[in-house]
Image (cartoon, helix red, strand yellow):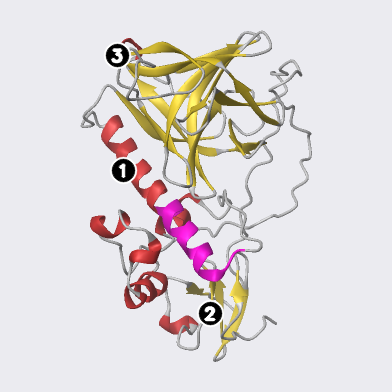
Amino acid sequence: MAPRWQPGEEYNYGDVVQYEGAEYKIIQPHRSQGDWTPPETPALWGRMQGGGHGHRPHHESSGEWGEDHEPQRHHGYEKQPHQQERQHKEADPPSYPAPVVQPTKEETEKHWFDISDQRKKELEVGGGLLAGVAAIGAGYYAYKEHGKKEEEKKAHQWSLNNWIVESQARTQQWRSKTYNGPVAWVWNEGKSIPRDAIQGGEERGEHLYICRAYHEGGLMIGKACRVFEKGAVIGYKKDEIHLDKYEILVGDSQAVRWVHCSGQLILQGATLQGATPVEGGREPDGHSQYIAQAYHNEAVHPGKACETYGDGCFIPYDGTEKKVKEYNVLCYA
């Protein structure tokens, strides 16, 4: 029998509770409050039918290599074991109802801490806080929740959700040919690389493409490739992070060019020779990141450049980040 629903509890994907003789399954993770009972919060809980027997939870695929493709094992590539061990297995709900309360466009441009307490509660109960996250499944939480205060967690959820929603809207515009621009960041999952992806490097005969993903309050630029463990890799604080949900840069490769840089990136100076850099990502503190590429260990890797990095750019490589003083920045042609 499922445990009784309780206020003040942290509920996560896969949880089932009992309330007033009925069983409910989690839709969106949250910490319950006294007036957030399952019947009153349909965006957070789904009532189960037939005595509580719901759909079998769906787990993310293991990402095994296909039998007909065994890429050579070397730095920058991770061969996936046939049975991958996951420390945290989370079940994705089979379906999600549309959020009862949707954030406005003006609200999505605000920081979570700038929204009123009443509106925050409406968004949480109405499902608007995690609508985008729910749409792609439970498995994507690029930030680490351990040790964070509750409001800080919600601020990360808010930023993550807004990134996902904006990315999916932009992707739809690009695919429907209504996007205004020669290149765009579009949503991508796994190891399948879009035909119009812009190449950012090459290693041992494999093309490396330009990606970015939300992580710890920032939007980190990295690299994507069909032979990577999950499809994409970003770097953050000397750590290499593998992701299967990310954005990839697509568009007209003739509309952009690489501009050589050396040392510190200074946008207002002569560093980029008057060229305009392509929009990239951002640091958690708000500083803009730009798309870089650098030669390292007989290969060219996509990475990130920022005015605050000092004398070089960073590339994710071999489980960490490498700083390279000579690099290129992607600019509009």
Q: Residue 73's image quarter? A: top right
On the question of residue 16 being in view, the answer is yes
Secondary structure at badge 3 equals: helix
Crowd around label 3: few <14 · some 14–19 · many ≥20 (10 Å): few
Tell whether 127 sits left or right of 55.
left
Give the Cα separation between the discs numbered 1 and 2: 31 Å
| Pick the front one: 176 or 276 | 276
> What residue does disc 3 label?
255
Q: In the visual, does 268 lie left or right of 285? A: left
Q: Secondary structure at mark 2?
A: loop
* Front one among 188 and 109: 109
Q: Number of labelled discs?
A: 3
Q: The C terminus is located in which quarter? A: top left
The image position of residue 254, as x and y in percent, is 32, 10
Q: Is residue 46 above or below residue 144?
A: below
The percent coordinates of residue 275 (x first, y second) are 30, 16
**Residue 238, above or below 33:** above
The kind of residue tagged 3 is Ala
The kind of residue tagged 2 is: Ser
Q: Residue at coordinates 48% horizontally, 24% vertically from top-left? A: 210
Spatial separation of the CA atoms under disc 1 and disc 3:
23 Å
- For marks 1 and 2, the one nearer the N-term is 2
Three-letter residue code for mark 1: Ala
Q: Residue at x 34, y 45 (%)?
A: 166
Of the numbered discs 1 and 3, the one sitting upstream in the chain is 1
Which residue is at 29% across, 15% downward?
A: 274
Q: Estimate the x, y position of residue 208 in percent, counting from the top left.
A: 55, 18
Mark linked to residue 169: 1
Magenta region = 148-161
Residue 128 appears in the figure? no
Q: Which mark is residue 32?
A: 2
